[in-house]
Image: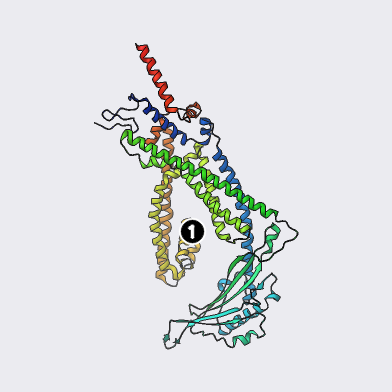
């Protein structure tokens, strides 16, 4: 006996009929199918259709619109506050460069280096002197870090190989690879001069690896007072490094600063009210409550979809003896709800961190910005879901969803080719081109070439010290540009356009794409027909059975 062509027919084991030919012996069985069909159809309705079907207000839609507005306001507020923190850090680092680096010029950090032994001692002496005169020189509110009744010391440490005898003229050397460290400490307000202190500090230039000068400077960011925010106290752990790892005769000097933000121990602000701070905290609490409500509603919808999927799968297995395709099962799992759940989770965590930052419990600006930024990004991406209710926008969303698997496969294949070019360029062209010195810069350079950026400088800046490598670089760059721009990108665009044409043709022809849609197409009831309101009743199936029994009894009576 052949299988029935319609997967969703109510099957008789011996004679499987179609939906049109089936005459149910049990009326409640057909009513259960109709009830399931209406439940699934109602689940896939948009908020406007659900309102016409059962009069249910679109609270979830309203909540999402309100959430987008208040989360955006929160992000802008936090961004402006974070911008003040970043500005203070950057300008403080620039001030330290001018205070402690001898003859420093803005923008000259990449070429700032020393080449003579006397210059090394002069720069160290200059740093010690400027550190001792910090109170008199700085125009900011910088101060030394206190350790009890005194100040913390400035530390000078040199790292060098333990033993070594190096004779380049004879092309001989003897070196012990173990690294030793020699450190001295200089306290501010000390009576001895820097020259006296450096007499006991001998730099072993032949074996020198690096010299590190570290000290801590404290400061207070007062610019937040104008915006009705409490100022933070900053600890700048300044590290000045004389880097001689290359042993090339050029010691590069670098100044870095690790910042630690702390709550000020004792503070008093007059002429300003803390009311705005409390209002900001209340606003953040409102966002947390809104996101928790949205999270709960979306989780409920996801669970409802999974339960409907299980009920639908059980129906197919019971009446047709076939498994439901995974494509139909995934239709019940709404990816937009998953996206909203993730965004709500990130926003809740970020809002809690923001509240703790506002109340000076934590100072994790970077962590908070990651959570708030990612959460807001997902919230705005979720707006696309509501644009999908319009036919012209929906085709774009369907195209992205349908093309996604093929795009991922294409990216995997293209990524292998891209990685091979990165590795080859790093090894061959790295010594001759600054854009190929590290794998990270190689990847950035090649990605720029794919987008048509910076092409001429990439070709031009190739050093011509080796004719063989120069010729190889031309072949390498020309083949990469031709392969990725003219072939791979064209194929990528073709995948998207083919999927778009397929979706557009299917929408115009009205072809049903899945068995689930065929199952739902049997139900011709419109949202405003009123039958969906009846399905809310617990006695729907019983009422339908009674009505069908009455109709059958009247028909038998008339025939008699």
x and y percentages locating residue 165 in the rendered image: 44, 88
**Relative to 22, 469 lies left or right:** right
**Where is 525 relative to 560, above or below?**
below
User: According to the image, label 1 marks what residue?
Assistant: 448
Residue found at x 68% / y 62%? 223
Q: Which residue is more in the foreground, 444 or 93?
A: 93
**Where is 210 relative to 1, above or below?**
below
Report the number of numbered marks: 1
x and y percentages locating residue 34 in the rendered image: 41, 29
Asked which quadrant contains residue 469, the reply is bottom left
Asked which quadrant contains residue 542, the reply is top left
Q: Which residue is more in the foreground, 91 or 57?
A: 57
**Where is 366 relative to 125, above or below?**
above
* Residue at far left of view: 1
Which structural element holds mark 1? helix
Q: Tell me the quadrant of the picture where the N terminus can be found.
A: top left
x and y percentages locating residue 383 in the rendered image: 53, 44
x and y percentages locating residue 338 in the rendered image: 47, 46
Q: Tell me the quadrant of the picture where the C terminus can be found.
A: top left
**Relative to 109, 502 lies left or right:** left
Q: Which residue is more in the foreground, 152 or 405?
A: 152
**Colour convention of the picture:** rainbow
């Amino acid at each position: 006996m052949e299988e029935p062509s319609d997967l969703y027919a109510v099957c008789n084991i011996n004679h499987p009929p179609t939906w049109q030919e089936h005459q149910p012996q049990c009326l409640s069985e057909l009513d259960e199918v109709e009830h399931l069909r209406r439940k699934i159809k109602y689940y896939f309705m948009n908020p406007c259709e659900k309102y016409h079907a059962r009069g249910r207000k679109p609270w979830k839609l309203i909540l999402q619109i309100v959430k987008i507005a208040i989360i955006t306001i929160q992000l802008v507020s936090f961004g402006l506050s974070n911008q003040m923190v970043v500005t203070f850090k950057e300008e403080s680092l620039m001030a330290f460069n001018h205070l402690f680096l001898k003859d420093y010029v803005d923008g000259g950090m990449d070429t700032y280096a020393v080449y003579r032994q006397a210059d090394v001692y002069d720069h160290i002496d200059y740093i010690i002197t400027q550190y001792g005169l910090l109170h008199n020189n700085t125009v900011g509110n910088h101060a030394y870090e206190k350790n009890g009744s005194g100040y913390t010391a400035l530390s000078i440490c040199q790292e060098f190989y333990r033993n070594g005898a190096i004779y380049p003229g004879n092309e001989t050397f003897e070196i012990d690879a173990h690294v030793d460290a020699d450190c001295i400490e200089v306290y501010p307000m000390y009576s001895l001069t820097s020259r006296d202190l450096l007499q006991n500090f001998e730099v072993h230039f032949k074996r020198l690896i690096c010299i590190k000068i570290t000290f801590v400077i404290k400061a207070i960011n007062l610019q937040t007072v104008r915006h009705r925010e409490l100022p933070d106290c900053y600890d700048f752990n300044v590290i000045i490094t004389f880097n001689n790892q290359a042993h090339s005769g050029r010691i590069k000097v670098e100044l870095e600063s690790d910042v630690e933000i702390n709550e000020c121990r004792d503070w008093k602000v007059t002429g300003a009210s803390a009311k705005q701070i409390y209002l900001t905290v209340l606003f953040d609490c409102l966002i947390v409550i809104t996101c928790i409500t949205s999270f709960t509603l979306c989780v409920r919808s996801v669970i409802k979809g999974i339960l409907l999927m299980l009920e639908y799968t059980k129906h197919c297995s019971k009446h047709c003896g076939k498994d439901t395709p995974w494509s139909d099962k995934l239709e019940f799992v709404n990816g937009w709800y998953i996206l909203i759940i993730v965004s709500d989770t990130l926003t809740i965590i970020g809002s809690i961190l923001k509240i703790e930052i506002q109340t000076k419990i934590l100072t994790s600006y970077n962590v908070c910005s990651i959570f708030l930024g990612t959460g807001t990004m997902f919230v705005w991406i979720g707006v696309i879901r509501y644009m999908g209710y319009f036919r012209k926008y929906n085709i774009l969303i369907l195209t992205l969803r349908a093309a996604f698997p093929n795009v991922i496969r294409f990216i995997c294949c293209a990524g292998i080719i891209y990685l091979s070019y990165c590795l080859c360029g790093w090894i061959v062209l790295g010594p001759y081109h600054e854009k190929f010195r590290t794998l990270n810069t190689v990847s950035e350079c090649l990605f720029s070439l794919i987008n048509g950026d910076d092409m001429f400088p990439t070709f031009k800046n190739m050093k011509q010290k080796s004719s063989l490598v120069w010729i190889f670089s031309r072949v390498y760059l020309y083949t990469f540009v031709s392969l990725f721009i003219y072939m791979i990108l064209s194929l990528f665009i073709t995948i998207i356009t083919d999927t778009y044409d397929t979706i557009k043709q299917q929408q115009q022809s009205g072809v049903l794409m899945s068995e689930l849609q065929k199952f739902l197409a049997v139900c011709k009831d419109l949202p405003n027909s009123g039958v969906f309101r009846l399905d809310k009743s617990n006695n729907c199936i019983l009422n339908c059975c009674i009505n069908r029994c009455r109709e059958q009894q009247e028909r038998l009576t008339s025939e008699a």
